[in-house]
Image (cartoon, rainbow, N blue to C red):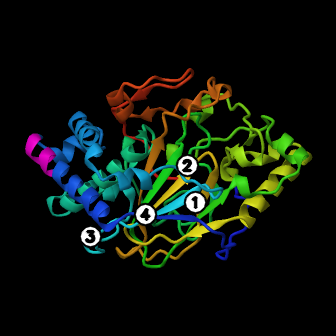
Amino acid sequence: MKSVLSERKTLHPHSIERRELPAAAGRAVRELASEISTTLDVTLDDPAAATRTLTHPLLIEQIDARVGELPAEVRHAMRPPATAAGATIVGRLPLTDNEFGPTPPSWRDAARWSGVPAIRAHSFQFDLVMLLLARSAGEPFGWYGQQDGRLVNNIVPAAGHEHEQSGASSKTLLSPHTEDAFHPERAHLLMLGCLRNPDLVATTVSSVRRVELSAAQRALLSTPTLPILPDISYGDGHERYSAAPIPTLWSAAGPDEQTLRYDPAYTPIDGADPEFRTAYAHLTAELERVCVTAALAPGEVLLVDNDVAVHGRVPFAARYDGTDRWLKRVNIRLPERPRRAEEADENGYGQRIVAPFRAAGALPVERGTHEWDVVPNDRGTLEHS
């Protein structure tokens, strides 16, 4: 399905919240990740294999046991975005461009290279940095069907996928979307950490709390009308499941509390009546009008409230020479923010979640929550972020 957004690089600049992590706090995160990495290297027979997806029980135990050692400024910086923009840039972790080696040609190569001794020391440690930050915010989790169940995903351009609606694309605009909008257990927060971005390729963020819609449009978009299908990163097989319509908007007391589930590239918009399509097109235009752009620098982290804001990426020309943009991604659940009862009966198209931190914390499961497991399988070829 083709995106309904225009493909252009110039987007409206609006303010975005920014938080600065004190230098000492940034160093503390990296130093703790290094200590945990060393502990695991000594404890495990084959740490590269055992921690392949970052779900090994000893790794989870170390993160949970030691995240409280980080300075209070870290947890404060990693709290959910506090403004109507629905996004926050957190700066900056200490790192250098050459410590991680060249940008991998695909997420599979990134995963394989992390097992190479000469590369592993820094690559694996930064994955632990991402987990420590994510655990400071909430519960990191992954997906069985995406990047082999890894808790920390690699977002890099991949040759041959330049025009797809996935994080592996480059030449096309990655349409603003709710991360994993098709699933009732999608992330509350999305965290993107930058390792390399020499061309200042911008991530786009648009908040539903900044759009202008009429009461009639809000009512239409709050009515379950169309399904949202799984994106390309989950492969096929979802056709076996019923595609139930869901609301695009969730109306609360007013616009200041509005949330959304939105992914135009994977929504069969032609199946709706003209009135709904007009309202959806207006929402799309409004999300473009209020768009925020964030060109992350190495060491910066972008937090997106996945219930409030949609995110995408502007087009760029990938070189595939080891110098291209390289981000890390983590999905985060907030235990204090349960999903709505209306979502409880959705089938999630059979996709299951890898959530070792929930098991470690023995937290309650809300009604309708799907099975949460810790052992990944080997599905998924791309990523949508």
- The answer for how far apart the CA atoms under marks 2 and 4 are is 16 Å
Dot 1 or dot 2: first in sequence order is 1
Residue at mark 3 to residue at mark 4: CA–CA distance: 14 Å
Q: Position of residue 226 (x, y in %)?
A: 76, 39
Which of label 3 and label 2 is nearer to you? 3
Where are the magenta residues, as a range? Answer: 38-43
Labels 3 & 2 near each other (Cβ < 8 A): no
Looking at the image, how many numbered discs can be counted on the residues? 4
Residue at left offset 13%, top offset 46%: 39
Task: Give the mark, 3 or 1, whose residue is nearer the N terminus.
Answer: 3
Residue indicated by mark 4: 156
Q: Amino acid at mark 3?
A: Gly
Q: Is residue 329 left or right of residue 68?
A: right
Q: Residue tagged by mark 1? A: 164
What secondary structure is marked by label 2? helix
Judged by depth in the image, the label closer to the viewer, 3 or 1, is 3
**Does dot 4 land on a helix, a strand or a loop?**
loop
What SS does tag 3 mark?
loop
From this view, report whether residue 301 is shown above or below residue 201.
above
Q: Label 3: how many residues lie within 10 Å, few (<14), some (14-19) or many (20+)?
A: some
Residue at (75% x, 66% y) in the render: 289
Label located before the other in sequence (3 or 2): 3
The residue lying toward the viewer, choosing from 299 and 319, is 299
Using the rendered image of the protein, determine whether residue 123 is visible from the camera's viewpoint. no
Of the two numbered discs 3 and 4 on the same chain, state the one appearing first in sequence: 3
Q: CA distance from mark 3 to mark 2?
A: 28 Å
Q: Is residue 40 magenta?
A: yes
Q: Position of residue 111 (x, y in %)?
A: 30, 54
Residue 232's label in the rendered image is 2
